[in-house]
Amino acid sequence: MKLIETLNFDEKGLIPVIVQDFYNDEVLMLAYANKEAVENILKDESGWYFSRERKKLWRKGEESGHTQKVKEIYFDCDADTLLIKVEQKGAACHTNHRSCFYRKYFRGKVMETESPLPEEFEEIVYKVGLDERKVMDEVYKIIIERRGTMPEDSYVASLFKEGLNEILKKIGEESTEVVLAAKDEKESQIIYEATDLFFHLLVCLAYFDIPPSTIRDELKRRFKISGTFEKESR
C-alpha cells in the first residue's frame, strides 16, 4: 500500500508534520502537509509543506536557502501525524534560529535557549550561486561595511558599539557552545555552533583590520613546518 493511501488527512485535507534533525533528533519545527506536499516529499526528498495562512504549497528553503534533505519518514499509530527526519542546512525557523522551539518556560520565566544566526552572515552564506571558497571574504566585507555605516538594526554594528570586550565575550560564549556540542557528540550542532564561532572571530579580526587572507597565509606558512619546531621558534 502506498503511503498516501495509508495516511489519514483531516477534514481540510491536511496532516501535521513533526520535523526532527536526522543526526541528533532535535525537534526543529511543526508544519502541515497536504497530499501533494507528501507526494513531493517522496519524489525529491525535500521538505514540502502546505501553508494554512497563505493557502499554498511551499518548499523549505526556496527563498532562504535553508533547505531540508529528508532522510527518514515515520507516521504514528493512527496514521494522522507524520514525523520526518531531515538533514537541515542552516536554520529551520523563519526567525533564523536552528529550531522553532528556541524558547522554554522555566520557573515562571520565558527564556531563549539559543541565539539566531546573525542576518549579516545569513545574507552571504545562503546567497544562491556564491563560490564557497569566497564565503569568508564576503562575510568579512559585510562586517567591515556594517562597521563603517553602523545601521541601527545591524547585529554587527551593535557589537562594535559595545566595544572589544563585548566581541571577546561573544567569542568566549560561542567557544563554550562548541565544546558542549562536541561533548554531546551532536554533529549538526557542532557545525552550527562552530559557524557562530567563526563569525564572531571574523568580527574580532575586523575590529583590528586583519583580513581573513592573513590567517590563510599563516596556515600556509605552518603547513609544512613541524608543530614542535614551530612552537620552539616563537
Image (cartoon, rainbow, N blue to C red):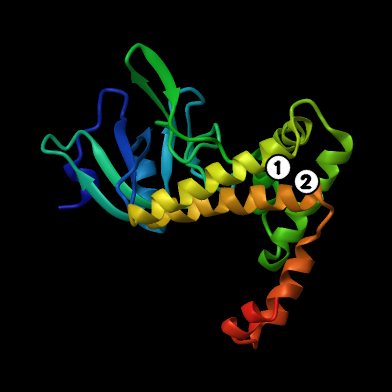
Which residue is at a point 85% across and 44% down the rendered structure image?
145
- Callout 2, which amino acid? Ile
For residue 29, which quarter of the picture? top left
Residue 44 on image: x %, y %: 42, 57
Between discs 2 and 1, the one toward the N terminus: 1
- Left/right placement of residue 46 relative to residue 137 reads left
Residue 218 on image: x %, y %: 73, 74
Q: Would you place residue 116 above or below residue 227 in this image?
A: above
Q: How crowded is the residue under tag 1: few (<14 C-alpha within 10 Å), some, or many (20+)?
A: some
Q: 13 and 32: which one is in front?
A: 32
Q: Which residue is mark 1?
A: 120
Q: 137 and 40: which one is in front?
A: 137
Which residue is at a point 63% across and 77% down the rendered structure image?
231
Tag 1, which secondary structure? helix
Q: Looking at the image, do the residues carrying marks 2 and 1 touch, with CB atoms under 8 Å apart?
A: yes
Q: Which residue is mark 2?
A: 143
